[in-house]
Amino acid sequence: MRLLIIFAFLIPTTTLFGQEISSDTASKPSNKGRMYAFWGWNRGYYSNSDIHFTGENYDFTLNEVKAKDRPTTFALNPYFHPAWITIPQTNFRIGYFLNDKYDISLGVDHMKYVMVQRQTSKISGDINVGNKYDGSYNNQDIVLDYDFLTFEHTDGLNYINTELTRNDDILKALKIKHNFNKIQLNSLLGLGLGIMMPKSNVMLLYGTRYDEFHLAGYGFAAKAGLNLTIFKYFFLRSEAKYGFINMPSIRTTPSSIDKASQHFSFTQVNFCFGVTLYPFKKSK
């Protein structure tokens, strides 16, 4: 929905640009060799997931656990403070054009995943750690209170990935006259895959809090978006992604024996700004 709103805003804007610019349009150079980098922010939405916990004295599964993201309130600090810009949910990416239409890129989607506290879940398995939660469970209701479990990937749910993206000139397709050096509007379609390197904040069964980076699994996603380039070197971009994350090895305590596993789908909407350069410019 946010992507559609942005699209609805951009089309009239670019139409006005097209009407104001001379019909003597600048020739479009080849994109091959073009490079870009961008920075931006995202919102994340997650499907429910089953989480399986294993350790020396427990082995149990929580079913259909709900989670949400944790957006930071927008302000100059921390969004534009050099020391704190990684606190919000962010996106960073660098890319290179293989030819006119396709680019390959490497980036980090820094999302945040927070289990909803005090929700009721179904539990199955065994716990024997010497506290009130000891017992054998068979699909029973349990309230996920703070003394039982806090479970977050808040620094964050880091998806380090590579993407292949197709870029199509919308203004050219709509036959809107425009000067390439002043404005471009491209549609984006892409696929990506990568590894999950979360910094998970977990406290389980009155245990020790754990919060360290670790390699937990993998993810892949498809995306669609719009890219508005202004004066050839600067651009605004909005993307919507839908993907799948599988993390079979989530660290939950300082002990390497204790682990959790989960998989879920995600939707991400992001808005970014960036620069693009033509170090290998060729005339078309």
Image (cartoon, grey):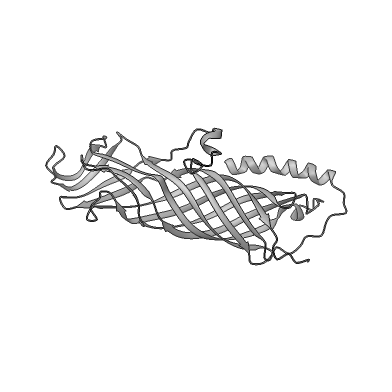
**Nearer to us in this view, 61 or 132:** 132
Question: Toward the viewer: 84 or 33?
Answer: 84
Q: Position of residue 125 (x, y in %)?
A: 18, 49
Q: Position of residue 177 (x, y in %)?
A: 82, 51
- Residue drawn at (65%, 50%) of the image: 227
How many labels sit on residues?
A: 0
Query: In x, y percent, where is residue 205?
Result: 21, 41
On the rendered structure, is 69 left or right of 120?
right
Where residue 58 appears, as percent x and y from the top left, is 17, 49
Q: Is 54 drawn above or below residue 148 in the view shown?
A: below
| Residue drawn at 49 percent across, 53 percent down | 108
Most extreme residue toward the front is 83
Nearer to the camera, 261 or 96: 96
Quarter of the picture holding the C terminus: bottom right
Q: Which quadrant, please, contains the N terminus?
A: top right
The one nearer the camera, 172 or 156, is 156
On the picture, is 167 further left or further right than 109? right
